[in-house]
Image (cartoon, helix red, strand yellow):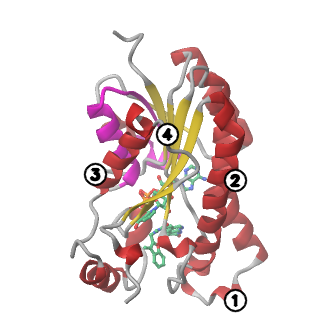
Amino acid sequence: MSDQQKTGVIFGLANKRSIAWAIAKKLHEGGWRLAITYQNERLEQEAKDLIADLPGAAGFMCDVSSDEQIAKLFEDLKARYGELRGLVHSVAFAQAADLNGEFVNTSREGFRIAHDISVYSLIAVARGAAPLMARGGGIVTLTYYGAEKVVPRYNVMGVAKAALEATVRYLANDLGPKAIRVNAISAGPIKTLAARGISGLGDMLKSHAERAPLKRNVDALEVGAAAAFLLSEAGSGITGETIYVDCGYNIMGF
Ligand code: NAD
Ligand code: 0WE
């Protein structure tokens, strides 16, 4: 049984509102054995309390800005599980100053940090995971509409998400011959820790719900279900894609 159980690693658990947590619950429901990572000691207790609710799941600390921590994590995963079939990257960060001011004032260091944490980290973890995906696998990351249209104050994160979506295509091309698929989910706005600090989020959620064809906002569990689909056999023909899970918001012109 445990030989047939697929193992996946999820990056980016902060708390119960995290999209990473919704994805973990859906993958767990789908029979996956999970390794779930959190950024640092500050998040450790909350992460471990959540992970304890998913039988068979284990928690690992990993700051994705550190090559050493990424290398150590994949050593640990190799020793513990031998093989990986799935990876979920649900990590992003930009300095608050760069999300509040005008985009034109983005600093060199702010640009670097946003791209290092939110984009380069996907390349680094994909490279770490690929040798463990000996029988193929799936990689999913999370993006947002601000990658392609201007969303006021999303600023340098929008530019980083555009780079993330291009990174998904280049990784898909490199890893396709190894039967590793790489896709992004473009989620509508969800009230998570990463979104809560944003001023005007309430108004944004309201107008998003009014304009989206489904006349509501997306639930994190719907994003989780889409990730589980992409990582399952049902997604076997899909790679390099950005799939919208946004109640249809992105299709509207007016
Ligand atoms: P979240 O705050 O719960 O998750 C973001 C995670 O990134 C946190 O767990 C944080 O610890 C982690 N992180 C930041 N820097 C890190 C580092 N150096 N090393 C390791 N981890 C680090 O918020 P979320 O909304 O669940 O965000 C998850 C993903 O979903 C992000 O990529 C975000 O851009 C994307 N997304 C969010 C929304 C939304 O409205 N909430 C919409 C579309 C896409
Ligand atoms: O990707 C995101 C959020 C990413 C994010 C959020 C923060 C807040 C706290 C990255 N870095 C930080 N850094 C912090 O210090 N989303 C899609 C959610 C989001 O963020 C916005 C949005 C939406 C939606 C920012 C401005 C406008 C809209």
Identify the element where label 3 is drawn: helix
Label 3 packing within 10 angstroms: few (<14), some (14-19), many (20+): some
Q: Earlier in the sequence, mark 3 or mark 1?
A: 1
Tag 1: residue type?
Answer: Val
Left or right: 106 in relation to 98: right
Mark 3 vs 2, N-terminal side: 2
For the N terminus, the quadrant is top left
- Mark toward the viewer: 1 or 4: 4
Q: Secondary structure at mark 4?
A: loop
- Residue under pointer 1: 104
**Which residue position holds label 3?**
221
Q: Nearer the viewer, mark 4 or mark 3?
A: 4
Q: Is residue 45 magenta?
A: yes
Q: Earlier in the sequence, mark 4 or mark 3?
A: 3
C-alpha distance separating marks 4 and 2: 26 Å
Q: CA distance from mark 1 to mark 2?
A: 22 Å
Residue found farthest to the right = 108
